[in-house]
Amino acid sequence: MNGGPSQIDLFDYKPKMDEQFDKDLPESIRQGQRLTTMTSGQARFPIAPSRYKFARHGQSGMWVSELLPWTAKIVDEIAMIKTTWTEAINHDPAVTYICTGNQLPGRASLGSWLSYGLGTLNQDLPSFVVMTPSWFSKASPQAIYNRLWSAGFLPSKYQGVALRAAGDPVLFLSNPGGVDASVRRRSLDAINRLNQKEYETFADPETQARIAQYEMAFRMQSSVPDMADISNEPKHILDMYGPEVHKPGTFARCALLARRLAERDVRFVQIFHRGWDQHGNLAHDLPGQCKDVDQATYALITDLKARGLLDDTLVIWGGEFGRTVYCQGPLSRENYGRDHHPKCFPVWMAGGGVKKGVVHGETDDFSYNVVENPVHIHDMNATILHCMGIDHRRLTFKSQGLDMRLTGVLEQNPVQAILA
C-alpha cells in the first residue's frame, strides 16, 4: 500500500485519543523525534483522533476499522504485526528500504533475492512479477520506480517483470507486423548463436542472462496472454473479487491475476497500490483507497484457501511507514490530515508459515512509539525469508568485495511469535 496507510484509522485502535482532540502532542511522547519538513514548521501538533468506528472481529477478537469490513472477515487467517518500524521518514528512501533492505538505490529487491535463492518453478513465466494498479485518489501519488523490483547486483535475469493494464501485458510481447512465430524462432536462434560466441570469448554471465531472457520472452508470448485471460473464471469467483475485477488495471483485477500467477507456480508477485498518502482530506481519500483493496484482499485470501494454495503461499499487506496521530493542516472532528510516521506501523501476513489470528506488539496510547515487541523491517524480511525456507544470514551474494544480504549486517531475527 504505497504511500503509508494510517494505522490509527485502520488497525491500531486508540479510544483514549478521543478525549485528547485538538490538544498538543505531549513532548514526553514525541521525545524530540525527527519530523518531515511538511509539519516541522507547524506552530502546534494537535491530536486528531480517528473519526472511524472500530470493532473486534473473529474468534481472535482483532480490532479493525469500519473502513475494512471485508478484511475484518479474514482476521482469523492473519498474523498482525502492529509494531513494524523503520529509520526512513520520506517515501523514496522508505519504500526503497522495505523493498531492497537499504535506503540507497542499487540493491537487489526481495523478489529478486527469492528468485536467486529458490530458482523458478515455471519455465514459461517469470519467477518475479510486478503489478501497479490504479487507485481511488486522483491526486498525484508518490512516484515508484522499476529499481524497486530490480535485481541490483544480482544477475539481471532475477529482476521483476512488470505487467501492464493496457496493450500487451508485457512490453513488446506481440510480434510486429509480418513476423510470425517461426520467423521469430529463427531470428532468436541466430541471435543466441552470436551471444554464445560472445560468452565463449568474454565469459560475461550477463550474456547468459540475455540468452535466457530472450528465450523466456519467446515462451511468454503464449503463456502470458493465457494467464491474463480471466474469461474462463467462474462467475462466483469474479463476484467474490467485486465489480472492479472486470476493469483491467484495478487492484481487484491484479489480485485475481496474483492468484492465477500463484497457481502457475510464479515464485513472487508484488502489487504496488498507490495513493495512500493522506496529508490532508483523509476523510475523503482514505475510504476510497480502502474500497479499492478491501474486498479483493478478502477474495484473494479466501480464493487461495479454497484451492489449497494458502498453506504454501505467504500473503503480505503493508506500506512503507505509518501516519502521525497529530494533524497536518486544518483539523476538525470530521476531517484531518496526517504526516509520515516511521516509528510504528502495521504489516500483516497470512498463509504459509505464520500463525492465524494473532497480534504481535503494542504501541503507546498515541500510536506514536512501540512499547512492546518492536519489529524492524529487517526483522520482517528475515521472517519472510524464513517462511520461504531460507536462513537470511546465509543468503548472500558477493558484490564490491562484500557478502551482500537483504537484511543487512546487524543481527536480525525472524519474528518467532508469529511463526506457525
Image: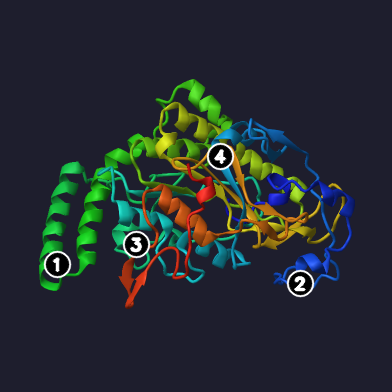
Q: Are marks 2 and 4 in contact (CB under 8 Å)?
A: no
In front: mark 3 or mark 4?
A: 3
Q: Label 3 sits on what residue type?
A: Arg
Q: Which residue is mark 2?
A: 40
Q: Which residue is mark 4?
A: 78
Q: Label 4 sits on what residue type?
A: Ile
Residue 199: numbered disc: 1
Q: Residue at x 70, y 55 (%)?
A: 363
In the picture, residue 66 is in which quadrant? top right
In front: mark 2 or mark 3?
A: 3
Q: Which residue is mark 3?
A: 394
Q: CA distance from mark 2 to mark 3?
A: 41 Å
Q: Is residue 267 above or below residue 139?
A: above
Residue 276 position within the rendered picture, expressed as x and y whole percent measured from the top left: 64, 52
Q: Secondary structure at mark 3?
A: loop
Quick one: label 2 or label 1, which is nearer the N terminus? 2
Q: CA distance from mark 1 to mark 4?
A: 48 Å
In front: mark 2 or mark 4?
A: 4
Q: How is the image coloured?
A: rainbow
Q: Label 2 sits on what residue type?
A: Ser
In front: mark 1 or mark 4?
A: 4
In front: mark 3 or mark 1?
A: 3
